[in-house]
Amino acid sequence: MVKRTILLVIGVLLLALPVLAQDEAMSEPQISYMICDWGLVTIEESTEQPPIFIDMTSPADYSAVEGTSFTVSGTGAGLFEGNVIVEVSAPEGDTIFQGATVLQAEELGAVGDWSIDIDLGELESNTKIFVTAYSTSPEDGSTVAYDSLYLNANSQFGLRYVDITTPYFSAGVNHSPLLIEGMAGGAFENNIIVEVRDFDSKDVLAEGPATVQTEDFAGSGPFSLELAFDAEPGQSIEVYAYQPSMADGETVEVSDIEFAIVSPLAQSYDRILVLQRSDPILGAEEMCSVAEAEFDNTNTDMLVINDVAVLSTRSMMPLVNVSIDAAGSSVCAAPLRTRVTRDGDAFAIEVYRDTTEPIPCTMDLAPIPVRVSLGTLPNPDYTITVNGQPVE
């Protein structure tokens, strides 16, 4: 029988994300959502560095490089023979440079450094260029790791830009108020405007100015502000940040936009499906329909459940998060999924690997932490089972 650990938290946590730390070393994933007519899809993306990746660390994105010769450097891991290919494209899309370098790592698969010298030859001043770094698979030539950035070449000044970093795409957000953060550069008097708009109607729900924190004139730096607005749980919004035009009637040329969902956990759902960001379901054209069909999937390998912890707010309508100490294969490419089915005040949680496609997995039992939120429940008296075992 699974032991149920109850943690009662005083206060209103209706807008908290379903993230429960298993231990101090465990990283917290980013959680985003998609609301379907049948229930909620929760998308979990680990913030840990993936085993195969490329990251460009210099020059900084949107920065300037003096002249047409410069060095691009970065880190990476898990690349076949350490190969890194770097391409530079002109504004029209034509490739004006391509070169290759090798990742320098202490051992196979370890994180290492790479760099490459780039010479673009003749180039007009203040030319916006697009730099990509990638590595390919030796089997089919497909790209297995990728990173990109924009630069202002043959210039002393960085590019004008706005980049919203909070909220991230499809995040569940608070609306009383909503914290908005980002980076911007090249803004007149270092000022930008931020709007929160209804996703469907495009009506502006809130608006406010933000100042780019930089000591340089039209420099690059962070910005942040909080905007409060009225919205219903599950309402789709978009956060729009832009550099205002110099003169009335001019078109806004520099902006960024992010999609978010207003506190989807402030209500309950009859069905919830938790997916990893890499899950093929998320790439389906009719994602909600494919996700709904997953509740009828019988090709499942249930994980071993060692312990369950439940975090619940002390209120008439508690927000309930469940942290599951599961175990399964340490090496397995089969999708890891969690589905929740509600029948009245009873919640059945299933944690499993999808075995529809025959994918070999190791036979060991490695720890696999799983998190899921049941949402805000209208009745504080509820029962939970995890892989058929009651949580008491």
Image (cartoon, grey):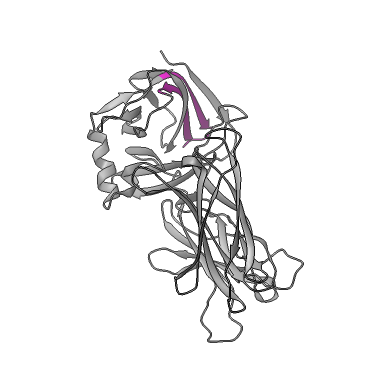
Is residue 271 or residue 33 the one in the foreground? Answer: 33
Q: Is residue 271 visible?
A: yes
Q: Residue at x 57, y 69 (%)?
A: 120
The spot of residue 51 in percent (x, y) is: 50, 37
| Residue 291 in the figure: left or right of residue 88 | left
Magenta-drawn stretch contains 310: yes
> In front: 206, or 302?
302
* Residue 156 location (% of width, % of height): 69, 73
Instruction: Give the quarter of the image for residue 222.
Output: bottom right
- The quarter of the rendered structure image containing the C terminus is top left
Q: Compared to 372, does 134 lie above or below? A: below
Query: Between residues 135 and 2, which one lies in front from this camera angle?
Result: 135
Query: Majority secondary structure of the magenta segment?
Result: strand
Who is closer to the viewer here, 194 or 331? 331
- Residue 271: x percent and y percent? 32, 38
Q: Which residues are magenta?
A: 305-329
The residue shown at (38%, 24%) is 383
**Residue 216 place in picture, x, y as percent:** 75, 69
